[in-house]
Amino acid sequence: MEDDQRLSRIATQWSIVRQAHGQADQQRHVAQQTLLDRYGGAMRRYLIAALRDADAADEVFQDFALRFVRGDFQSADPEHGRFRSFLKTILFRMVTDHHRRNQRRRRHEVPTSDELPEVADAGVDECGNDVDFTNSWRENLLARSWEQLHDAQRSGGSPFYTILRCRFEHPDATSQELAERLSEQSEKKYTAGNVRVLVHRARDRFAEFLLEEVAASLDGGSLDRLEQELIDLRLHGYCREVLARLRQRASLQGENHE
């Protein structure tokens, strides 16, 4: 399937959020698990960075998962901003709430009801926490893209994961040296020319997976919006060539419709 067709069919995370708070039990449970599996790593890394305590981070994450499954965030509205901003705002407020509870405990005060406020504006940037969350989000997107590349290879695809990891781990190696490494790891003999083609195609495939991951976190939108999100996350360099192809196809389609 072409890149633009695949992107247009992606179920956005906002649509999954709506399913996660729907009426059908099976659909709701699947959607809830999908979101927690997809972004649990990013959330945990952010919480560890914010709290400097793995146990506290796990406590807050479990609290988030409980509230999410319970339906506390069903009033979230994609009109307020990006999905990652929605999650960041919730987690920031939960971290703040965690610190307040600890302060009360240290002062031996009787805790008062201090529930998480409604997410009125998911686009709010919380000072001092945006960088930590953005870094965690970025790492999660890259990790998921590597996983998808690996899964595609294990399903019988070309050795894109192996050659790209090899190039990543040995950036100064020549194409001939990479060919020898790849030949050692497989039953097939590779030449330097084979490797150059494989690396190029592997980078394109990785970029496609990455674009899909980023596009899924946006509630639709244009290629301009997708590109800006990539720039904001410092991921644009991975996807520049694939984006250029998408723009060229979009331009040609526009001309054909005139």
Image: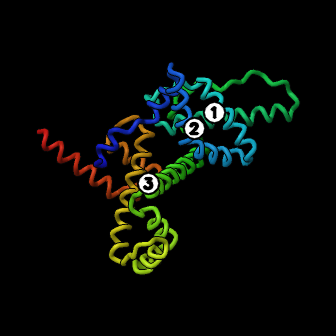
Q: Which amino acid does label 1 sit on?
A: Ala
Q: Which amino acid does label 3 sit on?
A: Ser
Residue lying farthest to the top in this orientation? 23
Q: Are marks 2 and 1 in contact (CB under 8 Å)?
A: yes
Q: Is residue 119 above or below residue 214?
A: above
Using the image, tell me which numbered label, if any, was put on residue 36: 2
Q: Earlier in the sequence, mark 3 or mark 1?
A: 1
Give the amino acid at mark 2: Leu
Q: Position of residue 86 (x, y in %)?
A: 53, 34
The residue positioned 52% from the left and 29% from the top of the image is 121
In the drawing, what numbered circle is on residue 65?
A: 1
Residue at the spot 54% in from the left edge and 47% down from the top edge: 137
Outermost residue, right side: 108
Which mark is on residue 221?
none
Q: Quadrant of residue 79?
A: top left
**CA distance for labels 2 and 1:** 8 Å
Disc 2 on helix, strand or loop?
Answer: helix
Q: Name the residue under label 3.
A: 155
Alpha-carbon distance for marks 3 and 1?
A: 32 Å
Relative to 244, residue 250 above or below? above
Q: Return the x and y of residue 248 as percentages of the image width and height.
A: 22, 51
Task: Report the front residue among 18 and 26.
Answer: 26
**What secondary structure is marked by label 3?**
loop
Q: In this view, does 202 lie to the left or right of 34?
A: left
Residue 89 location in percent, x, y? 57, 35
Query: Vertical placement of 213 versus 100: above or below?
Result: below
Query: Which residue is at the front of the view, 235 or 41?
Result: 41
Please name the residue shown 40% across and 80% down the image.
176
Which residue is at 74% across, 47% downward? Answer: 53
**Viewer-side label of 3, 1:** 3
Question: Is 170 on the left or on the right of 228, as rendered?
Answer: right
Q: Which of marks 2 and 1 is nearer the N terminus?
A: 2
